[in-house]
Image: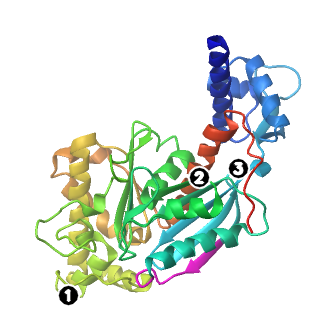
Amino acid sequence: MTAGIRHDEMRKRNRALVIAAVRQTGQPSRTEITGLTGLSHSTISAIASDLIDEGIMCEAGQGESAPTRRGRPQVAIALNPRAATVVCLHLSFNSLTAALVDYCGNVIDRKVHRLATLAMERQGLLDAAVRGVREIAHGRGGFQRIAVAVQGITDAAGTEMLWSPITPHDRLRLGPALAEAFGVPVTVHNDCNMIAVALRWLYPERYRDNFVAILLSHGIGMGLMLNGRLFTGTDSSGGEFGHMIHRPQGALCRCGRRGCVEAYAGSYAIWRRARGRDLLEKPIADIDTAEMGALAGQARQEEGAARTAFREAAEAIGFGIGNLFALIDPAPVAIIGQGTAAFDILEPRIRATLSETAGGQNTGSVHFETWPNETPFIQHGNAMTALTSLDREIFGPGLHANGSRSIA
């Protein structure tokens, strides 16, 4: 009996290894999978045949043959995009984005819904999430998972949004509401954490074991990967870089506290400082991208309030990164979001400030890479979170998910 259990566990493990190798590389040959997993060629062939028979994978044409190998080119295998679908939601300020994604991670359909998130009742927000899922999946058969990314702090269990600047309601139980409506597992994560997950999948040569993803936008967020694992707290999603204290009793932040990094580096903070407003004035809910661009233009042209605002933003970011690096050692930093449009202004002062900290002694080795649009990263991280859970929990063990719930 024990031997049977061990054999079954080994089979599940080996299947999961093969699926993970194919997901990571796209269309490898069986020989390439052998090299990636360390499994024997005969084991790979048997598992691949099973996965193809079950509809989880499919043959994808002729793969590359090894330079020293004679004979026919090897047949590559790939994930079958029709094996499963998942729904991804992104809840942010005044917006809910819903996407239906196939098993390969391709977006089948995507819809953006405009919501007045600050004014909506708690149940209204939950109902909007349910409608978003129902509409994106209507008429397309069942789906197996829902992944939700939110602009805010989530619980460590990945079930609810604990707090967010986009709504006055705390402890928004998105996971239970969606699970009850659709009967599938649901995960709820901070959107910056999903950016970090996406970077690891998309650019593993640089963003693999230890790196930082910082969102520069209306607010400031962070996703942190340590030793190849996404950092989360004991009780919450963790990594609240924007709400580290930069100046005690300083400028008012959207979170209600004073002196946070975000209260100096968020778009609303830069706008407030550049316009000569009181630093204790309640942060405005939104700022037009064009207006932030105009402020950046002023800062480039001349000394004045706009340049001072960007300088103070850079100092808050630089000290924050330096304090982080004092704990974890310098690591690659990805800067993402609309705030990167002014990174040419911010970077010199970020580096100068970073060099003043214990964690910034080797600032020359710190490299920043920027992307202006966070949405594709959040979408990809969300999708990979849902799909890899399917790999581990359904297709790896060999339980084909053929009982998906249909959408009425």
Q: Closer to us: mark 1 or mark 2?
A: 2
Report the residue at 73% width, 50% height from top: 84
Residue 114 counted in the magenta span: yes
Q: Along the polypeptide, which appears first: circle 3 or circle 2?
A: 3
Which element carries disc 3, helix, strand or loop?
Answer: loop
Which residue reaches farthest left? 249
Q: CA distance from mark 1 to mark 2?
A: 46 Å
Residue at image point 16% right, 81% down: 280
- Which amino acid does the dot numbered 1 rest on? Arg
Q: Quadrant of residue 219?
A: bottom left
The residue nearer to you, when weighing 263 against 394, is 394
Q: Quadrant of the N terminus?
A: top right
Q: Which residue is mark 1?
A: 277
Residue 27 picture location, percent across and down: 74, 39
Q: Amino acid at mark 2?
A: Pro
On whether residue 115 falls in the magenta region, the answer is yes
Q: Range of the magenta residues?
A: 111-120
User: Do the CB atoms of the residues marked 3 and 2 lie less than 8 Å apart?
Assistant: no
Report the residue that reaches farthest toward the right.
Answer: 72
Left or right, residue 77 beside residue 305: right
Give the distance between the C-alpha atoms of the residues marked 3 and 2, in whole angstroms. 19 Å
Q: Quadrant of the C terminus?
A: bottom right
Picture layout, residue 334 above or below residue 375: above
Asked if the residue under mark 2 is in contact with the one under mark 1, i.e. CB atoms within 8 Å, the reply is no
* Residue annotated with mark 3: 104
> Residue beneath label 2, please?
185
The colour scheme applied to this rendered structure is: rainbow
Residue 362, visible in the rendered structure: no
Residues packed near mark 2 inside 10 Å, few (<14), some (14 to 19) or many (20 plus): some
Q: Residue at point 35% right, 73% down?
A: 165
What secondary structure is the stretch in magenta mostly built from?
Answer: loop
Residue 316: x, y in percent? 22, 64
